[in-house]
Amino acid sequence: MKKITKYVIKNSLKRIFLYRACLVRLKMMGVEKVFSYTLANETGVTSDQVRKDFSEFGIRGNKRGGYEIDELLGKMEKIFHRNKDHNIVLIGMGNLGLALSKYQRFVQRNMNIVATFDIDPFKQKIRSDIPVYSPDRMKEIIDRFRVRIAIIAVPEVSAQEVCDDLVRLGIKGIINFAPQLLKAPPEVIVNNVNLCDELESVIYYVHKQIKADGQKNIELLYRDMKY
Amino acid sequence: MKKITKYVIKNSLKRIFLYRACLVRLKMMGVEKVFSYTLANETGVTSDQVRKDFSEFGIRGNKRGGYEIDELLGKMEKIFHRNKDHNIVLIGMGNLGLALSKYQRFVQRNMNIVATFDIDPFKQKIRSDIPVYSPDRMKEIIDRFRVRIAIIAVPEVSAQEVCDDLVRLGIKGIINFAPQLLKAPPEVIVNNVNLCDELESVIYYVHKQIKADGQKNIELLYRDMKY
DNA sequence: ATTATAATGTGAAGAAAATCACAAAATATG
DNA sequence: CATATTTTGTGATTTTCTTCACATTATAAT
Ligand SMILES: NC(=O)c1ccc[n+]([C@@H]2O[C@H](COP(=O)([O-])OP(=O)(O)OC[C@H]3O[C@@H](n4cnc5c(N)ncnc54)[C@H](O)[C@@H]3O)[C@@H](O)[C@H]2O)c1
Ligand SMILES: NC(=O)c1ccc[n+]([C@@H]2O[C@H](COP(=O)([O-])OP(=O)(O)OC[C@H]3O[C@@H](n4cnc5c(N)ncnc54)[C@H](O)[C@@H]3O)[C@@H](O)[C@H]2O)c1
């Protein structure tokens, strides 16, 4: 039975990404070694956390010596399978799809969008580095480039249908930008990214913060009154 | 001191968003009442979890009767401050910024991008519903519309600088799409969204899944051999 | 009206994640 | 070379999150 795959990126994995970004920056600045507390400061976590995370992912440094940045990055490349290239397809060349297709950083990280698909014949005329095909050529392209990962950027109503097609064609991982939880077999990884929710949660926390600040002021006031 | 605000959206909050999306869909289908296990099935969590989450956010139903969808949505609107409108500014009208500025769903959820800003004079000529201004008009606009929330879609190198400006102008919450952890005072909420990381984590979990599948096959093989 | 049933709400138990704290090891210093 | 210092790595502890389990209550059936 097709079901919602409850897929949540582990916080420890998210932090590993943060550490890596930080390491890349430090390396560019010519730094060669790093301590857990350096990474901690730069990423807003505690140094214990950094070491625990490294431990979880089997990364080890040397006592007193900290971590060799190059070695660390090498290990992370392995963890994230950055040694090989990843061919990706993108479905839906609308506003968001177009932006994503032009995003250079995917390529820099060995993630290549080899083809995009759109039902709109007009969109299929877009001239850019990446071809825009009609969806009926999906099987051909996915097979030819051995694609296993897909990006969904079609309207909400079409997302599930597109997802079903992709799964049938052998796609194993999907990042979905349509605000619609996708149902897929449990062995298929689906990362539902909902930018509206992300923005709304900022608003939520801002309000909470403002309320907490207000509370603090009341407390201060109260303490003042005692004198 | 400006520091990284370690800001992670709570999983329970993320789930509340899921429930809401599901409720909206059910309501459109004419459904009026819902049970915890309905929401659970639709969102890939357990019904216990749904009830615990509701409990955390102070949402109560009636025993045996489940939850009134309208009432539930009303309570959620309150929780998410959807009763009032939220004015937002967007900085950086490049590929991503343009897509975001055209995204209708923000408006549908009472989040209005009232103005966008770009240093590129060419971008300032974009003709769409939302005006594109030079950054030197930021103070004026933010004050006029009482803006408290901002979207950053500028290149990595400019992101921190833009963030600093925004904070100086009274912005309290930021969603940042540049792959650069922003430093801000602790009372300012910063949601760093990194789409590269999101995609890469899909690849990570796909590989893990494939490896686990392989493992399962080996185990099966082993069990078979015992007979 | 009484009884049976079905769903909620929440303490208790269990699991997972984060923090603490310190022994072990590597490097620096005298 | 011996000692002091610094940082790692990891068990122990604490905190947070999830699942379990069941008393409670609203509805349905008889
Ligand atoms: N625009 C944004 O900034 C933004 C932000 C977050 C999420 N999203 C979501 O991403 C999706 C795309 O948004 P958008 O603004 O680019 O919309 P859009 O309407 O501009 O683009 C959608 C594209 O998908 C194509 N399409 C529709 N059905 C298809 C199918 N079955 N197969 C292939 N292509 C198909 C359409 O022809 C169109 O080109 C939506 O689900 C939206 O909610 C958009
Ligand atoms: N394109 C994507 O799909 C995508 C996806 C994820 C993240 N991002 C990130 O979002 C950001 C924008 O990406 P993009 O592809 O739109 O890049 P882009 O180069 O197309 O757009 C950047 C825009 O920001 C403007 N800008 C630069 N400095 C500015 C400043 N100080 N104030 C105001 N405007 C300024 C530029 O003039 C340009 O129009 C980048 O950080 C990128 O890494 C992009």
Image: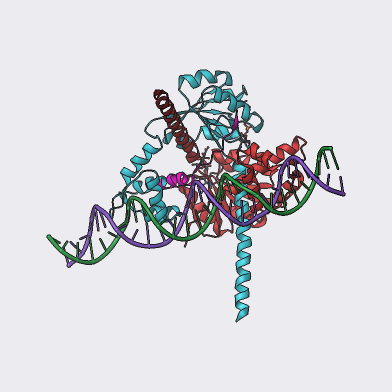
Chain colours: A red, B cyan, C green, D purple
Give the x, y percent position of residue B186: 54, 31
Q: Residue at x 60, y 53 (%)?
A: A137
- Can residue A129 be spotted in the picture? no
**Total number of numbered discs in the rendering:** 0
Instruction: Report the front residue among B191 and B87.
Output: B191
Residue A26, placed above or below residue C25: above
Residue A121, placed above or below residue A78: above
Examine the structure image and report whether residue B2 is included in the region drawn in magenta. yes
Residue B87, placed above or below residue A112: above
Instruction: Report the front residue among B77 and C14.
Output: C14
Placement of the N terminus of chain B among the 4 image quadrants = top right
Classify residue A119 as left or right of residue A65: left
Instruction: Report the front residue among D20 and A206.
Output: D20
Classify residue A75 as left or right of residue C16: right
Give the x, y percent position of residue A200: 46, 37
Which stretch did the figure color magenta? B1-19
Examine the structure image and report whether residue B121 is included in the region drawn in magenta. no
Residue A223, placed above or below residue B58: above
Q: Report which quarter residue B107 is drawn in.
A: top left
Q: Report which quarter residue B195 is drawn in.
A: top right
